[in-house]
Amino acid sequence: MPSVTLSDVAREAGVSLATASRAINGSANRTVRPELRERVLAAAAALHYSPDANAQAMARGRTTTIGLIVHDIADPYFSSIAAGVTAAAEQAGLMVTLASTGHDPEREIAFIEVLQSQRARAIVMAGGRTDDEAVNDRLRAALAAYRAGGGAVAMIGQPLFDVDTVVIENAAGAADLAGALHGAGYRRFAALAGPAGHLTARDRMDGFAAGLATHDAALSPEHIVRSAFTRDGGYEGMRQLLESGAAVDVVFAVNDVMAVGAMAAARDAGVAVGTGIGIAGFDDIVTLRDLTPSLTTVRVPLLEVGTAATELTLAEPALEPRIQQVASTVVLRDSTPPRT
Amino acid sequence: MPSVTLSDVAREAGVSLATASRAINGSANRTVRPELRERVLAAAAALHYSPDANAQAMARGRTTTIGLIVHDIADPYFSSIAAGVTAAAEQAGLMVTLASTGHDPEREIAFIEVLQSQRARAIVMAGGRTDDEAVNDRLRAALAAYRAGGGAVAMIGQPLFDVDTVVIENAAGAADLAGALHGAGYRRFAALAGPAGHLTARDRMDGFAAGLATHDAALSPEHIVRSAFTRDGGYEGMRQLLESGAAVDVVFAVNDVMAVGAMAAARDAGVAVGTGIGIAGFDDIVTLRDLTPSLTTVRVPLLEVGTAATELTLAEPALEPRIQQVASTVVLRDSTPPRT
DNA sequence: GAAGGCCGTGAAAGCGCTTACCCTGGTGCC
DNA sequence: GGCACCAGGGTAAGCGCTTTCACGGCCTTC
């Protein structure tokens, strides 16, 4: 790997190292005579010079990297956010380093430390937090250490830590959904609430219940079933619900993939989705828009969430942590037809 | 950002820089007395020392980064591959730098150059190539330059360049699918063939046609419609096909998302998918497994594809480019019920 | 016509590490 | 008891850049 260095270029062009550097990168308060610059650029091209980003980072004292930490990059929720982040990063001339933690908080912390070593300019963290205060504290500490080193952080989800956060309006969206379903004539509600400690799931549940309350409707506790935040969790939860024989018009699943599982469970149980029982989700995952019946859900503009978070980290640091709300909108579709 | 450096740690521990380094990273042929090592580690912990990865990269002459270039990270095809790559990378103690090019070859090339600057250990490139030899040449040149600098490259898709490649058995899988459909009683075939220059689409089409040929069936040219490699492309192609009034039993879409669009178009035209017309896709995208009717497709183990590609780049470099086949398997589902 | 600026260039000092290379004191062996 | 050896520690030379600083020429400016 006889990598060609800037000194090679300088020698080739017959100038000093300093001049070569200035010619290639342009310098703040030093200019290079055009003729010389040409010579340097020609030499660089001739030698196929490729600047060493590590060396530059080291000399300049800052990198061009931002980190993105997600639970599972294969999950369409996170991959949409990732698309937003990569787009915004490219816009800003940065590279993004991706970490997929598989929902393991320990790995989240480990990745924060690696990104700190990398001296990444910023970290964007997506994915619901839990209410386990022990790990939250360690995460907080890791983030604090990172920020102490001059790094910016933006979270996506709940404003749980003292950092800039893009907040998805989980509660408001779920409340709107409850209202819309009530308006469509639904009266007997059930919910697939996701796992107990999951904050996003909790927010959506709380919002849904609150939305029902404003319409004098209610969600009785025996109609709330807890299961994993996944497709299979949705399937299992729905199975239990149907098995219990609960009298229910419509089921709210706290995310789309759970709703998909629920739809499958209903079908397997011989219950028609839509006409027989309504099902609604949350997120409006793009690849899921062609389900039959099409799924009522709450749209979250995930791409914009990703870009917004990235831009937050790149903005001037503020004294107070910034909270950026992202509105979610109800999308009524065939899985919850109007009920007469 | 008064970042604490190794010298700070050394001073704090009362040892030399070299010893501190050896204590923290362990050295090849030097051991540090346990007592001293403890002292260094304690000092490091006390000062919240975080090694500078850039400096390490520079001193060691190699980084711990691998690059991943995909067309669109929000596409489930690529995000599944990305999941495989991140998993394999973490296994190997590497970080992955993600680039999403939006199908733009120019940006692919630009990203290769950036990754070369970063001195990334390896690059994994996923996504169908085109047959535009002008850009292919430039891409080849960029890759050659990168490899000349000691970088490893693995491609996912067609063995188009002289690099290690994980080849997805597009043709064989499509041929198997054709056979399976024929076996299920289908006789009149049509295909949504994707765009003209798209190699993956072409391979799948060729395989499908070849598979049909072995069964003395054929795909007449007027039953081949070309449209974008996307959901909307599938919709549009199917619309055209139905509008043409072609007498067809089953439609093969060259990927799952096109098949989804085709299903939607059929529904919108009042044609029942499955009983009325069969539809089959390719890829077996996970989030699409709960469509109704469930989609017949060819499963590609995308996660393994990602890990395999990563491992190829990390293996000892070979003289000859390695080709690793990944088998695809037909999955018959309800969208193509047996035809009597 | 001399003093002061300014501009373009080069020499050299780092940036934070790793790793030859060198040195010292202790051990084992004849 | 002397020698070779070795383990463990320190010194210092880079890695490939950026940037400060010093320097010389040339243009202004009284």
Image (cartoon, coloured by chain):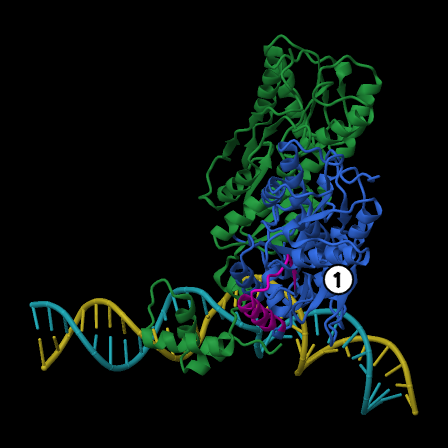
Chain colours: A blue, B green, C cyan, D yellow
* Residue C27 x/y as whole percent: 17, 74
A139 drawn magenta = yes
| Magenta stretch bounds | A123-147
* Residue B220 x/y as whole percent: 73, 12
Q: Is residue B154 left or right of residue B248?
A: left
For the stretch drawn in magenta, the main secondary structure is: helix
Classify B161 as above or below B202.
below
Q: Label 1 lies in what chain?
A: A
Is label 1 in a helix, a strand or a loop? helix
Q: Is B322 in front, or is A118?
A: A118
Quadrant assignment, res A89: bottom right
Residue holding disc 1: A311
Q: Is C2 in front, or is B69?
A: B69
Screen quadrant of the C terminus of chain B: top right
* Residue A213 x/y as whole percent: 77, 58
Screen quadrant of the N terminus of chain B: bottom right
* Residue A287 x/y as whole percent: 71, 39
Q: What amino acid type is highlighted by mark number 1?
A: Glu
Classify A31 as above or below A217.
below
